Image (cartoon, rainbow, N blue to C red):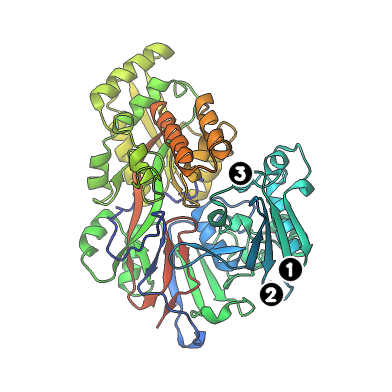
Amino acid sequence: MIMKKLSRYVNMNKGWGNMNKTLKVSALLSGAVILGSTFVPVTASAAKYKTINWTEGANVGTMDPSKTTAAIDFNYLQAIGEGLYRMDESGKPQLAGATSVDKSDDGLTLTYHLRDMKWSNGEPVTANDYVYGWQRTNDPKTASQYAYLYSGIKNADAVQKGDKPVTDLGVKALDDKTLQVTLERPMPQLESVLTMATFEPQNKKFVDKVGKKYGTASKYTISNGPFTMKGWTGSNNKISLVKNPTYWDAKSVKTPKVTVQTIKDQNTGYNLYKSKKVDYTTLSPDQYKASKNKKDYTVIAQASTAFIEFNENKKPLNNTNIRKALSKSIDRQTMSSKILGGGGTPATSFTSTKLAKDPATGKDFAKVAADKNAVGYNLKEAKKLWKQGLKETGKKKVTLQYLTDDSDGAKRSAQFIQSQMEKLPGLKVTIKTVPFKQRISLSDEKKFDMVNTIWGADYADPSTFLDLYTSDSSFNNGSWKNADYDNVMKAAKTTDVNDATKRYADYAKAEKILQEDAAVAPVYYQAKPSLLNTNVKGVVSNTVGAPFDWKWAYKK
């Protein structure tokens, strides 16, 4: 948020800084940063290293891999889990839970050979654990919003709709250590997608034992990853990630423990950092200005976009001119420089920058697909469109509620947006601030007029953004629908799927449709200016997927 879904990311809006010189970027523009060090394989005993004290902006929501949607949750799930693939230190997917994969000549049948792994309760991880976890996520009864990532795996769409049983999903255990996955069409993004916690195995015996409590507290979680979770009651502000001795690659895990506490107030986080009680905190605009030249200053790069979603089930937000007017009323440059501390980059597209290169031009796809006229600030044009929209809807005055998080940064941003929109004649904007978890629920339940949200890329492909707004998407909380958009997105997945140039051209068309119809109002591209203890090394910061991976982290 985000955060992963439009609500995957907690909306901290903490004065995002520019990319700093430590950023290492892969060929797709997405990548990862090793914060504080160059990656070195670990063999030393964890006993010689200290506990890392981290901060987050919101509490854990759920540790159920089938139900999570928040980036914060994905951080923890990546810490305690291991799927077929894991992002390495450069942001590229590498085999993790599997040692090798055999591909059929047509590329549609993949056979994974699993490594010897154990659950934290001592039981072996088997191919059936993958089958169970994947089927559970796709089962309509689970109502997993992230099940859409399975689209392309045989029968996934039909299973999610309830048209076929979960046993028809294209995943099969050939034996305890051999997993077969069958696709119904090529999935160019598959390896990156499979790094997501949504595809991690799940232990059926454990899930059946704890029932509905699964993933609601640390005692109701189970691990096959680098760490186990301790001390989480389901609502408290501090938890611990403790090194998992049964993890297959435990020798690479240096730190004995990572403690994470929720800090919503930026001054509190800053003061805790200054007093050396925490090793990491994000910065407010004022703190950013005071800290940007210090050696412990760093920028957490993310392929993510902050945007406003409109609930088109509510009038007059179902009117295109009204939505366009609201979007054009926002001075994104002023917001970036004065509200976000100079670091937030004004958005000119929904799809984030630093995600992928357009194969036809070699340029950042978001810049190729950007339309400054559709997304940019123009108050004169906004007032004209607003007047036209009011006439079309028979309105003279309008009151709209703006839903946002209760963090300091989110409140500042909301107040700025409010002041901008209220320049439109006859418009009153009220602000509703709620905890992050509640904002997710209200968004999912479509109980909002406008909601301020952040979407972070799950994998390095424009579809991670654009799939959100097809008519049947579980993330389309604003209920926007456009047949041309649906058709273009379908072409990208079918007729054009094997031609990267055509597929990206489809995505560019989809982006243009989204912008021209003001389905959402992109506001800025996100990055987080932060302070990180220089004694903390090896934290991987991913631009896609889970923002942080502590597997290789340590503090001397």
Label 3 sits on a secondary structure element that is: helix
Dot 2 or dot 3, earlier in sequence: 2
- Considering depth in this image, is 88 or 454 the residue closer to the camera? 88
Q: Are marks 2 and 1 in contact (CB under 8 Å)?
A: yes
Q: In which quarter of the view is residue 307 placed?
A: top left
Foreground mark, 2 or 3? 2
Is residue 383 rendered to the left or right of residue 547? left
Label 2 sits on a secondary structure element that is: loop
Q: Is residue 357 visible?
A: yes
- Of the numbered discs in the image, which one, if any, rests on residue 116? 2
Q: In which quarter of the view is residue 131 placed?
A: bottom right
Between the residue at mark 2 and the residue at mark 1, the CA separation in whole angstroms equals 8 Å
**Up-down relation of residue 160 to residue 549 (above or below):** above
- Of the numbered discs in the image, which one, if any, rests on residue 177? 1
Label 3 belongs to which residue? 148
Name which residue type carries label 3: Tyr
